[in-house]
Amino acid sequence: MQQFSENITLAEYVASPELSPLPDIFADIFPFHIVLNRDLQVLHVGPMLRRLYPHIKERHYFDQHFRINRPNMEIDFDRIRAHHQSLFLIECLNNGMLLRGQVIYVDCEDVVLFLGSPWITDSEELEKFQLKLSDFAIHDTIGDFLFVLQAQKASTNDIKKMADKLEKQKVEIKKALKQEQELSSLKTRFITTASHEFRTPLSIISSSTGLLEEYDAKLDPTKRAKHWHRIQSAVKHMTTLLEDVLLIYQTDAGKVECNRSKIELVAFCHEIIEQIESSNDAEGRFKFNVYHGDLFSGDLSGEAPNIVVDDNTMMVNVDSKLIRQILTNLLSNAIKYSFPNSEVRFDLSIEQFYLTFSVSDQGIGISAEDQERLFESFHRGTNVSTIPGTGLGLSIVKRCVEIHHGTIEIESEVNVGTTFTVNIPINRIAP
């Protein structure tokens, strides 16, 4: 949808296909507009006219409710269109209120659009027509004029209240426009990323299924199994992308909760490491260290609800699904963005009330500029080059950490490496 800016004119905006139905933001800026089709039927009226004249229905004829006082002309679509952008004075037959403005012809919709406002020169007439200053558009010169007249009769506090209300309306419009721009940008990034990420696995599926279909009987079992594995991997890749997007949506909508359950944390971490080593051909690249405080070597009775069976066993209450998302993304990224055959250090530290995951790689690093947008969905570092990725991993990590009421910190230097540190509040329990 086009948006008002210094680079887009009003004529360009109303000429957009989104004009019908009119966007809400347009109705807010022109609350007294009228849209007529070629048969001079009313297709749409602004919210203020709709409030003042609820009897005006869609497809009613213009001359049932209005009369053109200026220019002096016969009511005909082509004649009105010929006065494109001319000054019009339209009378509302119901109560005689005059609307002053101009008509714009919208070619792509073949409609004429009247943009105006009540022509009132005395604030006393506001009550007569059941109008308030807030009913006028912010940009309206008549509204500004009436504001000055009424301000002369109001107290200082009343003037401040009206000015604050006008300023609030401006802020709300700017906020709505900014949110729409951000949503549009997010949609664009999603479409770009999804189309790029799906292209490779779809090509793999297409080529492998084609070979299996045509040469299945001629392929030896090893090659046949290889093609089936490629298909399964491609499907898994696409499924993961869709699941990541769904998780982003669910967390933003507040539909993901922290459901804690008992897990043996050290074994859980070993399982994730093995999966990542297998899927990334990274066997032996992780150095996994487990640390705990003096609390666990002595008497664990009394106030401390903390149990450690031995040096490598830790029972904790956490949401295993969220912790899996955190560790899988951090460890996978560490392998992906580190230099070939370099070591990735994974430290697990447990204290009385929280546990800490620290993942350090020796790789391309993250610039200070990219760190400012690090956790935005679909944002990727400017130095990732051709390394594949969606830009969703760290966004998911941040959301999962926050759902756990934890924190995440980063230290990084370009071409040296990156360290992510995650702190998660926990309730340690006996197995």
Image (cartoon, rainbow, N blue to C red):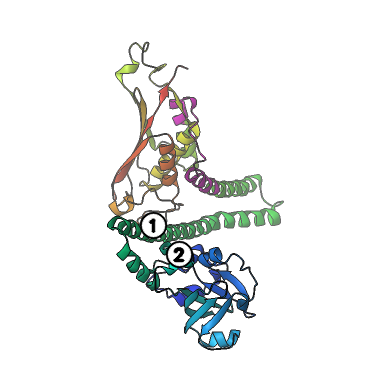
Q: Is residue 228 visible?
A: yes
> Residue drawn 41% across and 40% down?
331
Q: Position of residue 157 (x, y in %)?
A: 30, 55
| Span shown in magenta | 242-270
Mark 1: give few (<14), some (14-19) or many (20+) Cα within 10 Å: few
Pointer 2 residue = 127
- Considering only vertical position in the picture, is 176 above or below 112? above
Pointer 1 residue = 385
54 is within the stretch colored magenta: no
Secondary structure type for disc 2: helix
Mark 2: give few (<14), some (14-19) or many (20+) Cα within 10 Å: few
Q: Position of residue 120 (x, y in %)?
A: 43, 73
Secondary structure type for disc 1: loop
Instruction: Report whether 366 appears left or right of 394.
Output: left
Foreground mark, 2 or 1?
2
Instruction: Report whether 285 appears left or right of 223.
Output: left
Give the camera-side residue of 348 and 97.
Answer: 97
Q: Position of residue 396 (x, y in %)?
A: 45, 44
- Considering only vertical position in the picture, is 212 above or below 270? below
Q: CA distance from mark 2 to mark 1?
A: 66 Å
